[in-house]
Amino acid sequence: MIEVRNLEKFYETGVGKTFVLRRISLDIKQGDFLTIMGPSGAGKSTLLAILGMLDSNWIGEYYFLGEPVHKLKPKDRVELNKRYIGFVFQQYHLLDSLTVYENLDIPLSYRNIKRSERQSIVGDTIDRFQIVGKKDLYPNQLSGGQQQRVAIARALVNEPELVLADEPTGNLDSRTSIEIMEILQRLNRETGVTVVLITHEPDIAEYAQRMAIFRDGRVVKDVQIAKRRDAAAEFAALPPLEAEV
């Protein structure tokens, strides 16, 4: 699905070039669940923005589904983004003035899908993510975990091939983090959607099939995770909320 070769990003300064990414080469197959882990400033979010075609100021080669992104015009990159990629952010990025239902409808409206078809798709998505009771609420009426569930639903409403998640559990407690990782694992397993997730937390990285470790803008390790954590089993083993102190 993704082939990156010798990708670099830098800023010109008074003393020369300051590299954010240096000689990144990475292959991501269809159906992979990859976490990119590393400390703040390692270049993780910068790479995610490039993979999502939100940043075009870089050098190197990037192939997405066989398309040479590094050679495409901006409008063609935008079309690839809209058609194939969904985003999940740490800060949720829901529109506060819109209800849950309307937040899910917005990405579909950008694709000029008929209203009746949008209603069907949004309805199915709301059922799938078990947020029927929240559909008429606004983001500020939801908990952080509920907002992130809606954000994931919004990222999936267009049925993308690739989901890019930037610290999706960063603002959540441990219980809700497990729930969110269970959703992502299930979607990856059941639908085959490719997931690339950024985190600086080793325990979150262990939910993936594979982990790439970044340091100072470079990939210093790329390994398969031999014993992947099972979020569904962990969540089922948690005590009921009423039993928590």
Image: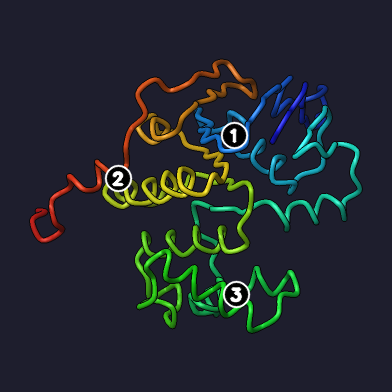
Q: Nearer the viewer, residue 14 or 224?
A: 224
Q: How far is disc 3 from disc 1 in space, using C-alphas?
A: 30 Å
Residue that label 1 marks: 44
Q: How far is disc 1 from disc 2 in space, using C-alphas?
A: 27 Å
Q: Which mark is residue 145?
A: none
Q: Amino acid at mark 2?
A: Ala
**Residue 70 image-quadrant placement:** top right
Sequence-wise, the earlier of marks 1 and 2 is 1
Residue that label 3 marks: 105
> In the figure, 101 relative to 58: above or below?
below
Circle 3/circle 2 CB separation < 8 Å: no
> In the figure, 146 relative to 9: above or below?
below
For the N terminus, which image quadrant? top right
Element class at badge 3: helix
Q: Amino acid at mark 3?
A: Asp
Element class at badge 1: helix
Q: Position of residue 135 (x, y in %)?
A: 43, 78
Residue that label 2 marks: 232
